[in-house]
Amino acid sequence: MDAQSLNARCVELFQNPNVKLRMWNARMFWQVGDQLNVPSEKLTQPKVDLCELEVMLAAAALTESQCAPELEKKEPGRVAFIQRQVREGMRPLLKPAH
């Protein structure tokens, strides 16, 4: 999945009602300047690794991650760690965007 499609998936997952219950602010994951309530079309510059973000948001949205197999191949155990953190009500520290 290319970066633009992956970002679009992350933005879509971020709008999921289960993710919204977490009260995460878009500023945690995307460069948005000093804006607080950012429209989804402005979420284009990620601060964190998009693959890890997709895994985290999918876990919070209670849906299957599309990036999990790729991330697991690249870094074994990382997917399970991120998913476990989300299940336990925490927000895992994600790697910075490249």
Image: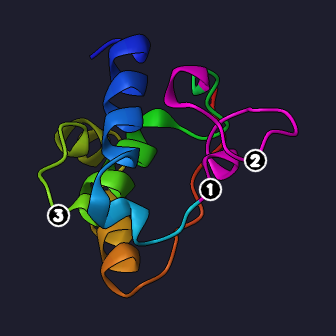
Vertical relation: 64 (above or below) 74: below
Which numbered dot is residue 62?
Answer: 3
Please, what secondary structure does the residue beneath circle 2 have?
loop
Quadrant occupied by the N terminus: top left
Residue 67 inside the magenta-drawn segment: no
Depth check, front residue: 77 or 26: 26
Residue that appears at 22% across and 46% down: 68
Please, what secondary structure does the residue beneath circle 3 have?
loop
Residue that appears at 37% across and 57% down: 56
Q: Which residues are magenta?
A: 25-42
Say whether marks 2 and 3 touch (CB < 8 Å): no
Vertical relation: 89 (above or below) 9: below
Q: Amino acid at mark 2?
A: Leu
Residue that appears at 41% across and 62% down: 20
Q: Amino acid at mark 3?
A: Leu
In the picture, residue 63 is in which quadrant?
bottom left
Is the magenta region chiefly helix, strand or loop? loop
In the picture, residue 89 is in which quadrant?
bottom left
Q: Position of residue 73 (x, y in %)?
A: 24, 41
In the picture, residue 37 is in which quadrant?
top right
Circle 1 residue: 25
Residue that appears at 36% across and 61% down: 19
Q: CA distance from mark 2 to mark 3?
A: 26 Å
Circle 2 residue: 36
Depth check, front residue: 71 or 44: 44
Say whether marks 1 and 2 touch (CB < 8 Å): yes
Mark in front: 3 vs 1 = 1
